[in-house]
Image (cartoon, rainbow, N blue to C red):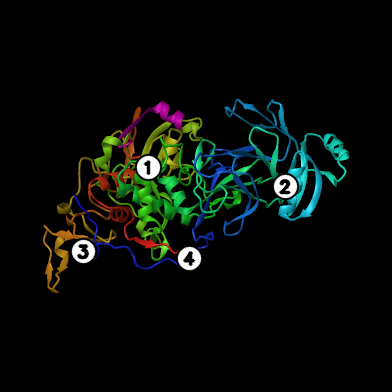
Amino acid sequence: MRRQWMTAFLTALMIAASVLPAEAVAQNREGEVVIRVGLASASSHVPTGELEAAHLENEDGYGEGYRFGYYDENLDFVELARTGSGTTQVAVLKTTNLTYGYSSALDKYTYGENLSGNIMVGCYHVLVETGLDRERAEEMAARLDGGFVAWIDGEYQVRAGAYTTKEEAQAAFDSLSQALDVVGTSSYGMNVVETGSGRILFQYDMGQGGKLAIQPGQKDGEETRTWFSGYHYRGGFQYHRRNGGNLTVANVVELEDYVNGVICYEMGREWPLEALKTQAMCARTYVLKSLNKHDSYGFDICNSSSCQVYRGMGTGKSYGPSPTSLQAVEETAGLVITYRGELAETPYSSSHGGASEDAKNVWGTDTVQAHPYLRGVVDPYESYADSINAKSSWTVTYTAAELTRQLQSKGYGSGTSVDHLELTYSQLGNVIRLVVHWENGRTSTFTPSGSSAIRGCFGVDSIRFTVNGQTVHQGTRTSAARGSSYAINGQEEIKSAEDLYAISGDGTVSALDRDAYVITGRGSVSSLSAGQTGESGSTGDNQGGGVVTVSGSRYVFEGGGWGHQLGMSQYGAYAMAKQGFDYEDIITHYFPGVEITRYRY
């Protein structure tokens, strides 16, 4: 099986020569787009919540020491202070009294308000001098016992000590001949300490809008890999106390490094190169389309499946980017998916079970005018990956009483029982509406997304299923010979081969017959196939649109696929790559009508 997508003149889609206008992105001094990825946050989309203490450790051979400062509006790092090259571990702490000790909840040694231990970092200090330049501040701090450089409200200060009570700090102040005051910070202040000690290396307090940056290594441009919360990351880190409480942490990383940290977690790291290229294209386009999505939390994008799973360079040699995934990113660097000169929406999920769905039936998206590339398509390829796809088929069974309890646990049908179900199928054979009729005469309506999402409420993996084996057109399969259509550009339909004409190289025009074949721009040959618009053609056991009513003492949900049913199927991309399709073929199959464009930063 070879490529099956074509233009109206039966030529292959080529990479578009046009470029996008520059978007409102952060572009650093090297000209690279920089992304802020949430690693710890109060956002429900980030698995790690805000932290009292956030630890970093440089990986051996990838950067020495740390630099402290902030990121400017272009996310270029501005240095205010640094450690020596021998410092390998640091922790950022909120400026309150914290003790270094073992946390059973976190299963590690860290700093916390409720831990036991002999090492304390207090929130009171002696102010020694203010209004200095950096060199003078560092010299003075080095001469003091417990001295450190602080950046407070935009100026350097020299402070000493980290006392847990104001009385202790006052006693230290009284013993110094040249001290100005006993001070603390605002509720937005942060300390950087050498991990396992009470020694402050640097203090930062710029009030509510202040964000501390830490850049591993001694100079810009060197490759660093730094451990944070079980994974190691390229780039730098940004910290702030969003509401004056615990720390929010973001990884500040260049775009292609971000994509490297996504595709090996969203797709198998050793999957075929062309599948990984497709994933890289979707991931790159998605993040550029989603910049500032979580700006209210202080970062562009989260690190979970609510955005895209991101784990940087992984857990070490055993997991993370592979040579193949790194190659996929390198060979597609700077390329994005566009429609009419704009970044496209590029949703993807694990598998579709035979056909994706129109976004209008899932998200309410306009798939006629604005987003025609998000119309559902029949997927004849995904089944070739069934042997490695645990969700290629699945069954969920309820008795009537169990289904009632399942739905009542979601807040539906209190005080009554399920009488029967009414399922509405799309033309592609996916369930786009499910109405539960209760014995008391009332109904509850469920849809593919939102608070009454079918998958979540019924405990199924996709919206592609039957109940008790009942389908709209049981046992039938459409084909080109039985009234389906030929797809042109993945959108327009031609009802028969007799409606198609070929233009030869010398300009001769002739009608096509049913045995027509396509030669693409790259020279591959494929038969002209039917049903590629997603409006007709084989859709497995769920044929055509219509309504099915199901009742009984048992409800057996049999289906296939896993995910929201939109855009690219990852197992479908795997199967297509295995059959010789390249990433352009895969992208234009799942997003018909799009172009592949070089993004101008």
CA gap, disc 3 to disc 1? 37 Å
Q: Nearer the viewer, residue 271 or 489?
A: 271
Q: Which numbered disc, 3 or 4, marks the residue that appears first in the sequence?
A: 3
Q: Amino acid at mark 2?
A: Val
Q: Which numbered disc, 4 or 2, marks the residue that appears first in the sequence?
A: 4
Magenta-span inclusion, residue 403: yes
Contact (Cβ within 8 Å) of mark 2 with mark 3 = no
Residue 46, placed above or below residue 501: above
Q: In percent of the image, x 71 and y 26: which residue is there?
A: 118
Under tag 3, what secondary structure?
A: loop
Q: Look at the image and tell me whether residue 382 can be seen.
A: yes
Residue 364, placed above or below residue 100: below
Task: Read off the residue under disc 1.
Answer: 322
Under tag 1, what secondary structure?
A: loop
CA gap, disc 4 to disc 1? 31 Å
Task: Read off the residue under disc 2.
Answer: 149
Task: Read off the residue under disc 3.
Answer: 10
Which callout, 2 or 3, points to the residue nearer the camera? 2
Question: Dot 4, crowdedness within 10 Å: few (<14), some or many (≥20)?
Answer: few
What span is colored magenta in the figure? Answer: 391-406
* 165 horizontally vs 49: left or right: right
**Residue 512 shows which numbered tag?**
none
Q: Which numbered disc, 4 or 1, marks the residue that appears first in the sequence?
A: 4
CA gap, disc 2 to disc 3? 68 Å
Picture coordinates of residue 52, whole percent (x, y):
65, 37
